[in-house]
Image (cartoon, coloured by chain):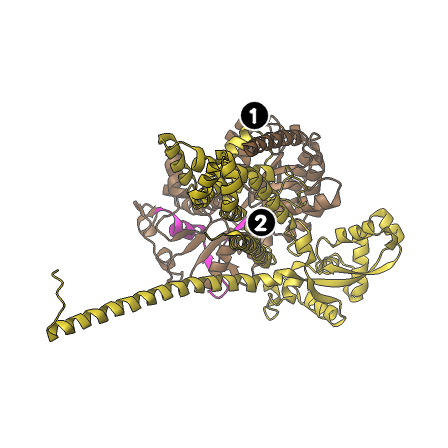
Chain colours: A yellow, B brown
Amino acid sequence: MSSSVPTTISSQAAANRLLLRRKRAERRFQLYGILAISAAVGFLVVFLASIVSRGYMGFVQTEIRLTVNFEQELVEAGSYRKILRTSLAELFPEAGSSRAERRALAGLVSAGTVFVLRETVEAEPAIAGTVQDVWVLASDPVDQFHKGRIDASLPEEERPISDASLARIAALEQDGRLELRFNRSFFSRGDSRNPEEAGILGAIVGSALALVVTLVVSFPIGVMTAVYLEAFAPRNRITRLIEININNLAAVPSIVFGLLGLAVFLNVFGLPRSAPISGGLVLSLMTLPTIIISSRAAIRAVPPSFAEAAIGLGASRVQAIFHHVLPVAAPGTLTGAIIGMAQALGETAPLLMMGMVAFVVEVPGGFTDPSTVLPAQVYLWADSPERGFAEKTAAAIVVLLGFLLVMNGLAVYLRRKFEKQW
Amino acid sequence: MHTRLVAAVFVAGAVAVAAGAAQARDQINIVGSSTVYPFATVVAENFGRGSDFKTPKIESTGSGGGMKLFCAGLGTDHPDITNASRRMKGSELEKCRANGVQDVVEIKIGYDGIVIANAKTAPEMHLTLRHLFLALAKQVPEGNQEGGKLVDNPNRTWADVDPDLPNVAIEVLGPPPTSGTRDAFNELAVEGGCKTFPGLKAIKKEDKNRYKAICRGIREDGAYIEAGENDNLIVQKLAENPNAFGVFGFSFLDQNRDAVQGASIDGVPPEFENIATRAYPVSRPLYFYVKKAHVDVIPGIREYISAFTSDDAWGDEGYLTDRGLIPLPTDERTKFGDDAANLTPLESL
């Protein structure tokens, strides 16, 4: 266009119109942006609200105070079932001793109570022969009712809790024998098929062990690869091919790594199934590209003058890199590693192939013990028929999100703290 | 470069440690059906807490996946027990034997009913196997009549299937083809309805594959929605959509009676007693299979089997019935109880 300044009135008006239109376009664009952000924030809020509103009840559990007579002979004979039955019968003498009534009474407390009583005595043998007040977990239906998840106004056959049990729960509450308490077993036990006893410690330890393996394997290899590619490797076809492959690997669906792990680690090397060592190795394959890419970016961001100055003063290439470039690049490298770890923490698909989606009760004690991981535990609980697992699932998600938040927060903190301006 | 060396040494060391650990396994490994998983895990947990043995590790791999792992060979790298929501196939037993797994002990543990349920807020449904075939099969006889030419399923609403049924669109949420529940549903419900057409039943003699394709093929035009393996999700969706139906195991109906109701099939409602007496037509047996060569090598297998087959567990009033397992009739229970105690291996299938 020949850009002469508009002088006539009509062209002045046209310019004004154009200006107005451009301003409107800009406002429209800003509005779209705000809408997009509010939609994203809205989804996040709905997601968090639904998880937290379901999950917070998973951190408390209904408990019942039983007065238990640990009779010497019964303790010695190991008849804890009888000890429990007697103490329940004393609480509700009207129940009678028919089999159905006994079952109804036993159904008030968790199915694991018998074992809890035994463990109590084993922990403190002196209580044999005495009468003790013991807080035991309520069964899942009692717990769900107490938390208001079961509608008592429904006809009796449609709810998992009978009228007689409702009356007993009311009586227990009146006596102060029934209350919501912090759910210790959720953080101190492994998986269980009784929702009231199911804990997440096994999965947390399993995840931690797998992540240790992942970090130990993938961090050094990843950083070394990045250093070599950035600082030493000749620029030729082969290195370019390697670079492209690394970038591609970062986009490979994680299940593929699981299949690879199954074929290589389990079938060729014979590593144990369902163990953090094999799971961690698969996760490290998955994390490697993330670490390599972010470390390379961090190293590249260090001004070349750092290395040049060191070399100019007589340092070798290795000294220049390790003494001067890597320390400056550390925040970026660490951030990449932590984000890679956070990704690995949330991964289930490859671990499915490694047999880590499994029912494991004992908290793993080492790298070769069978174990499961946090997201796998969420998956398993979400698929369980018992009601109580719904809130356990949500609570486990809250724990998982908490760990992710801490890890990502740590990444941000490290970046802020060690980042240098030059 | 030291670090890389260290890492390599670490991996090599880990392999060595793991190989050592694999040789001395003291924990039972169980794989298999996701339907048996809720029952096997309860037994395993009680067994682990009530004895000095470690709690068995149980993976939910599906019946077919479990068989594959189970039959892969002998030795501590391979599972000791597999759960199944169907009987082992002849081909699977052959594969087991080819891989050195000579003696396999079969134990039937009980039954599971498959229910067709809808939301409590919707009217109760009374269906027949024939309804299910006409509503869900890929191809049906034209005009829903005997002798009609096979056409792609034209039935859009339940009223198209049978004028007595409500005039709402057919929308059934069920498990995907990888699931044992789906296999059983196709075989018992859809094929069961297919067989009520003598003309279709006759195909079986002529061409078995074509018969299977017709009688077990599920429509793919959106009326049957594969909702994944998560039955809790199906229950939730049913509660939100009163027009939809869901297909899942009896234990999920039992745990959610305040939200969903089961449709009666051929006049029989899906109740505990009806499934136990086999009056309810869509029920299937559940099994587990034990590698006899592993017994007494891996500690606790014998004890685990006897815990599973104790009256306390699988009896008429055992704790497994509280979880929704339908117990075996007494004579079958005696037979499989004896098999379990004597570890009688399968002869053939």
Q: Chain of mark 1?
A: B
Residue A396, x across and y down, in percent: 58, 55
Q: Amino acid at mark 1?
A: Arg
Q: What kind of element bears circle 2?
A: helix
State the CA–CA distance, disc 1 to disc 2: 38 Å
**Please, is residue B231 above or below residue A164 in the view?**
above
Q: Chain of mark 2?
A: A
- Most foreground residue, A118 or A212: A212
Q: Quadrant of residue A88?
A: bottom right
Label 1 vs label 2, nearer the camera: 2
The disc at residue A374 is: 2
**Please, is residue A120 above or below residue A256 in the view?**
below
**Please, is residue A215 above or below residue A383 in the view?**
above
> Is disc 1 in contact with disc 2, using a CB cutoff of under 8 Å?
no
Q: Quadrant of residue B191?
A: top left
| Region of the chain picked out in magenta, as a range | B110-139
Task: State the quadrant of the N terminus of chain A.
Answer: bottom left
- Most foreground residue, A141 or B198: A141
- Most foreground residue, A165 or A277: A277
Q: Residue under circle 1?
A: B97
Task: Find out whether residue B136 is within the magenta segment.
Answer: yes
Residue B174, x across and y down, in percent: 46, 51
Q: Amino acid at mark 2?
A: Leu
Asked whether the viewer can see residue B83, the reply is no
Which residue occupies 63% across, 63% down? A144
Q: What kind of element bears circle 1?
A: helix
For the residues beneath circles 1 and 2, the answer to whether they share a chain is no
Residue B39, x across and y down, in percent: 62, 47
Query: How packed is label 2: few (under 14 Cα within 10 Å), some, or many (20 or more)?
Result: many
Task: Find out whether residue B196 is within the magenta segment.
Answer: no
Residue B332, x across and y down, in percent: 64, 40
